Amino acid sequence: MNTAPALEVSGLEKHYPRFGLGPLDLTVPPGSIYGLIGPNGAGKTTLIDLIFGMGSPDAGTIKVCGYDHERDEVAVKQRAAYVGPDLNFIAWGKIGRAIRFNRGFRPTWDDGYCARLMQDFGISADDRIGTLSFGGRTKLALLLALAWRPPLLVLDEPTTGIDAHSKKAVFAEMLNIVRDEARTVFISSHQISDLERFADRVGVLHKGRLVAEGSTAELVDRHVQAEWVAENADAFAHTPGLTVQERDGPHWRGVLDTLTCPLHTLELRGARDVRTQPLTLEDLFLALTQ
Amino acid sequence: MKSLIFDFLHRWRWLFVISLLVSAVSGLMGLPLILAPAAVVALQLDARRGVFRAVRPLPITRLDQAKTWWVIGVPLLPLLSVPALVLGIMLFPHFQPSARSLQPARITTPMTETMLPMEPRPQALPETSVPDTEHRYIAPSQAPGKNPRAPWFAAAVQSWVALGYAGFCFFLMQWAPQRQPENLAENVQQGMFGLLWGISMPGVVFLLPNLPRSSDTIATWHWAVLAAAPVFVALSYFSAAELMRQQMVVTAAKNRPQATTESLALSGGLTGIPLYIVNFAGRIVLMVALIACVQIIMLRWMSQGNAPGHNPAAGVQVSLMGMMIGATIAESVGMRALRALPLSTVKLALLLSLVPWAGAFSGAFVSAVFCRAGDPSLSIWVNLGAQSLALCGWAILALSITLHISSGGRLFVLMLLSFIPGIAIQFAVQYTVLIAAIGLVTGCAGFALLIRGLRKSSAFYRPRGFFGMTPGQPTAVR
């Protein structure tokens, strides 16, 4: 059995005139749901594009199930399925034809599973792709990716534009995937609350760099929001693990990574009346990417 | 109303500038007003991207909005073109070459030669045969004394018919589909509209050059066309309100029965690459065949039943269409979806090339076999091979370059790159083998560029715009 990480990114860099991704190191263990969150322009889609050879990195390597994404590009795509918001199947006319085209490339295609997914998503083989809403097209892309049961499912904003029922169906399928077999889901999303519920591990990408990474529970547990009073303005500048969110005279508010910046660090630097409260993943995301 | 018109003029200023330049050149050189329906086409594109809907909430009555769209679509461009046309005609004498050096072969206008292919190319005229009149312009089909050009008359006829043609296109627009067809009746209706709309655009290229240039050359069908112009203008005016109503109708996809495993199994047959080939390459072959048929029928009609025979410009048009449609279809399939398939970069490049190749080969087939273009000293099949090589080579280069450009400007690049081999194989027939060799080299370079682009260019995977619309890869709402 292949025990290599489902996705392994090492020293990845990609530079554009106004944006740079990386250096980025990231490992997704097999059999997990990995959520990548980040604001617009953080580099999530760039990273996913590079996995599938849509552009080539300036430095670094990407491995999918142990296969190099450039040297073994076919092997990578035999193991990884891609769903993105810009996927386009309109030229195929009807959903059935798009399914037939994709089925020809996937020996493990499961017609029964495909039919069930179509029922779950409320689409039909006779539907014209041009008549589908944006959400409908996303569902089609999801169906084409799920129906051949890929070892790694890479989803770029899969729930954008789809209704609550379909979203529930998508996440249920993802849970089935990782429960039934040791398959992996790598998902980039703006729906942080969904990821908080479903993702085993989360990475926060900001301005092309991974600013936090770990299991979802661990990330949420180790970060706290703190409020304190202090007169010394310079005492908290550039403190590792402390992200100052707001300052109003002597009143401060910030997020602490208690692993690198324990609470007593604040007191050592002159803080008094320190109060803390737990964070949600969304609060953490907002604090880290402000 | 004025604000809407100025807004339209501002957004499409480049189109109007080109149209006015073409009008001035038309007046100067006696060319037809081939951009007559340009404003209607722009209006149709505006309608498709929802401008009508966006404007509807403005505090203007529906009738006034309808009238505004009619003014924009029908009389605006022909009226604006008149001063440019007049200017061109007034400048005509200053650009007139000496009558003694006037040779018909030099002053042949491509359009007049194209559209009347059955007439023999006139020999160089004896110097004394050219009357020393103010307008010495002589088209090949208009030998001196037979059909002298009367520029003011010709311009008036062109403008009159251009106005009518714009009216015809505007009238047709009310049947433009608002959504994908969902049953046979809608398919037929939309197919009919597509056919008429598709024919009406190149139709202007066939019609206008064959209009009379002087009062003594008016044929019966000219009278019919001249009489139809005001009818279509009137029809378009009265259909403007209906056009507005159609644009405001919100249509939604109907509910359909859910799929079952059985229905999927029954829909088997071709899958994967064979399905791609049949679906896209087959489609383009049929499209080129249809275009060629329409062209032959129209040429026969224009020539009153005579066989068209050798017609280089028709060959250029078909090869151009084949290459352009091939590249457009190839890029419309969606690069992201294709790139995620388990195909190596080289195989994917080959798959992408198949459709432009099919289009280019179909164009070459029509050009070499039906239009008899090529080196007359070579057999048809050698000419076919050479032209196929040339067109396929340039087609793959055109595809590669246009995939590197995600803006609407790529269509102009595509058109330019498609023109080069089309014109070369029709008008430089003595260099057929050389043109084929250049095509081969171009094809290799294009294929290498395609592979490079698939690997490195992010433009390949961007949503591709088409004058504000995204018929190919849709833009995500993030």
Image (cartoon, rainbow, N blue to C red):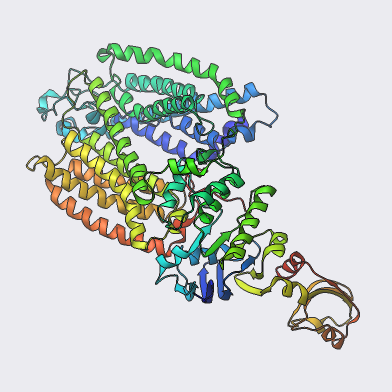
Tell me the residue at 86%/83% (across/down).
A232
Tell me the residue at 58%/36% (across/down).
B50
Q: Is residue B385 visible?
A: yes
Where residue B175 sits: x, y (%)?
50, 24
Foreground residue among B451 and A221:
A221
Where residue A228 sits: x, y (%)?
88, 77
Residue B337 sits above or below residue A280 on the image? above
Foreground residue among A161 and B368:
A161
Tell me the residue at 8%/43% (across/down).
B378
Quadrant housing residue A155: bottom right
Where residue B449 sits: x, y (%)?
34, 61
Where residue B27 sits: x, y (%)?
34, 29
Q: Is residue B122 left or right of residue A147?
A: left
- Outermost residue on the left side: it is B377
Q: Is residue B114 left or right of residue A265?
A: left
Foreground residue among A269 and B274:
B274
Quadrant housing residue B132: top left
